[in-house]
Amino acid sequence: MGGAEDDLRHLREDRMKLEETARSTYEYGRQLCQVALVLRRSLRMDVKNQIGLNEKLEQTWGRLCRALSENEAKLNVTEAFNTTIVEVNHRIEELGHRVNEVRDSQLSP
């Protein structure tokens, strides 16, 4: 089962890298939107479109955060499932050994 644990670890690492990249991209986009808004105001230009872009950025960021949270929840469920499978397999092996011991003791005079 070490392969499954490694796969989960790699998935978590990839998700963390994606989250870090997304966060820095979002922060950069937010700064650009703020600068553009300040420039539009200082030039007495219409800011309606810029405010719309800000809102779209925030909505997109919110959707991405929810998707990342859902992904983390799925990884947690998968990890719990794999842990349970390892435990069940171990118990089955123990039961098989005990059955063999009982059978061997009954066959031996």
Image (cartoon, helix red, strand yellow):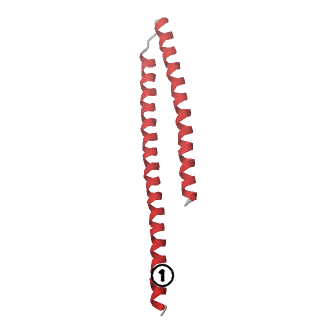
Residue pictured at 46% horizontal, 8% vertical: 41
| Residue drawn at the location 54% of the way across and 23% of the way down | 28
Q: Amino acid at mark 1?
A: Glu
| Element type where label 1 sits in the image | helix
Identity of the residue drawn at 46% across and 44% down: 72
Residue on which the image places disc 1: 101
Examine the image and state in which quarter residue 92 appears: bottom left
Residue 73 rendering spot, x and y as whole percentages: 42, 46
- Image height check: is 16 above or below 49? below
108 vs 91, nearest the viewer: 108
Judged left or right of residue 84, residue 5 is right
**Which residue is most to the bottom?**
109
Residue in front for this viewpoint, 88 or 20: 88
Task: From this view, report whether residue 104 is shown above or below residue 78.
Answer: below
Q: How many marks?
A: 1
Vertical placement of 88 versus 36: above or below?
A: below
Viewer-proximal residue among 3 and 56: 3
Q: Residue at x 42, y 32 (%)?
A: 62
Horizontal and vertical percent position of residue 33: 49, 19
Rendered view: 26 above or below 80: above
Image location (x, y in percent) of residue 18 = 55, 38
In the image, residue 75 lies at what x, y percent? 47, 49
Tell me the crowding category of disc 1: few under 14, some 14 to 19, or many 20 or more residues within 10 angstroms, Cα based. few
Quarter of the image for the N terminus: give it. Answer: bottom right
Residue sitting farthest toward the front: 109
